Structure formats: structure tokens, C-alpha cells
Image (tube, rainbow, N blue to C red):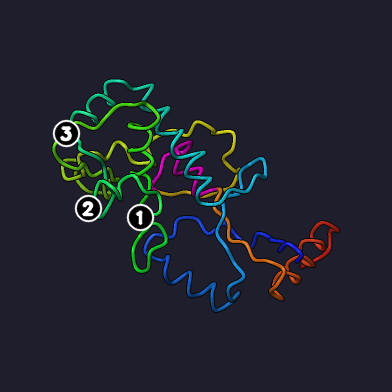
Amino acid sequence: MKEKEWITVEHPGYLGRKKELMYRTWNSEYGCYWRLVWELADKTVLDYEEIFSRIYVPGYAGYLLNNPKETLWLAATASYTYDKDLITREQAFDPNALYEKPNTPNQFHNVALNIALEYNLGVRFAGENPLQVREGKPGTNPDDWPIGWRFSPGRIPTIRPDLIPNINLDGWWKKGSIEDLYQKAKVLQINDRTPHYHRLIRQQKEKEDGGDV
């Protein structure tokens, strides 16, 4: 069977609470012939497991190695980390525990942090309670933010800034962070089993030929 061919439709950016709505919209427009993947600046396309293992985990591991005081504080303070919803220790090391679950925001940067500390660095969590690692809400008092806010992926620099696509996309994250790469590289693609695919191919060819679209 011929392998499906994919074409990028758009960079959807941060979805947040719009995720379920956007998924319904794409299902209505493209049926089951769409996907979200991450297209890096060098045109490498990664799926979720690859962006998690090749960008998130190494990013956190590199940060922890370069910031030993924060690493020791984290290990001594927490029994493991979580994002929005409190989870079990087993879930805290499972990248798919809270990824693409119905009516639930994706939560996995904490898993990358947990894996980076215990598996990559070999440092065990020794604290008594789970620690929330989540960005504080903009415009609120930092004293009210989760204790582990500084481990947000929007604050941790990516180890591969050269792979961040050169597109204009602003958000709550810092430029050059893990989150910056994740959001800018995220693309909506459709495959050649939908009529929209062939229309987009024609439009791209017209652009390349200098014609009006």
C-alpha cells in the first residue's frame, strides 16, 4: 500500500482551552486525515514521542546539570512533580498518562522533568510530597504561583535553539525555551486522502510559479 503523503496546513500555535474545539473543527473539515506533528527548522518532522524524548527530556536534563543548586533543591523538596492535575508517581513517569485524553489539557512537561532527574541524572526524589511545576497566571502575584513555577517549560532553555522555526508566534513563554520550540514547530498536516490536500498542492505550486492564489 502506498504510504500517505502529508502537507502542512498551518502553525496552530498554543491551543490551551481551544484544543477540543479545534479538534472538532479539524475533524469536521478534514475527517480523520489530519495530524499534529512538529516540523523543526531543518525540516525534520517529529511525532509526540520524539519531541518528548529528543527535546523535552534532554532540555530538562541539560538545565538540571547546569543548575546544581536548583537540582538539589528539587530532589530534596519533592517526591515527584506534576503539572495541573495531581497524579500518582506511576503516572508522573508516564509520558502518555495525561496526553491526548478527552476533556483534559495535555500535561507532560513534568514527566520529562521527572525522567530527566531520576533516569538521566540518576538523582532520586527524596521529598515527602508531590510538587506542582506550572507557570503562574500572567498578571497575578508571584507569591500565589505554584512553588515549582520556575521549572515551567516556558522558562527552561531548549538545548537546540537552532531547530526553532523562524516564524512569528508570541505567547506566554520565553523565546528560546523548550515551549518556544514546541509551539513554533507544531504544525497541522493533512494527507493525500482528502481533497483539501490536492487544492493546497496547487496553491503552493502557483505561489512558487509567481501566480495569484
**Residue 97 circle label:** 1
**Residue 74 circle label:** none
Provide residue 144's location: percent of width, then percent of height.
16, 45
Q: Amino acid at mark 3?
A: Gly
Q: Amino acid at mark 1?
A: Ala
Provide residue 145's location: percent of width, then percent of height.
21, 44
Report the magenta residues as a range.
Answer: 172-184
- The mark that comes first in sequence, 3 or 1, is 1
Asked whether 181 falls inside the magenta stretch, the response is yes
What residue would you read off at disc 3?
A: 127
- The mark that comes first in sequence, 3 or 2, is 2
* Quarter of the rendering containing residue 74: top left
User: Residue lying furthest left in this view?
Assistant: 128
Q: Secondary structure at mark 2?
A: loop
Q: CA distance from mark 3 to mark 1?
A: 22 Å
Q: Quadrant of the C terminus?
A: bottom right
Please say if 119 is above or below 81: above
User: Nearest the camera: 135 or 94?
Assistant: 94
Please say if 84 is above or below 54: below
| Labelled pair 2, 1 in contact (Cβ < 8 Å) | no
Q: Secondary structure at mark 1?
A: loop
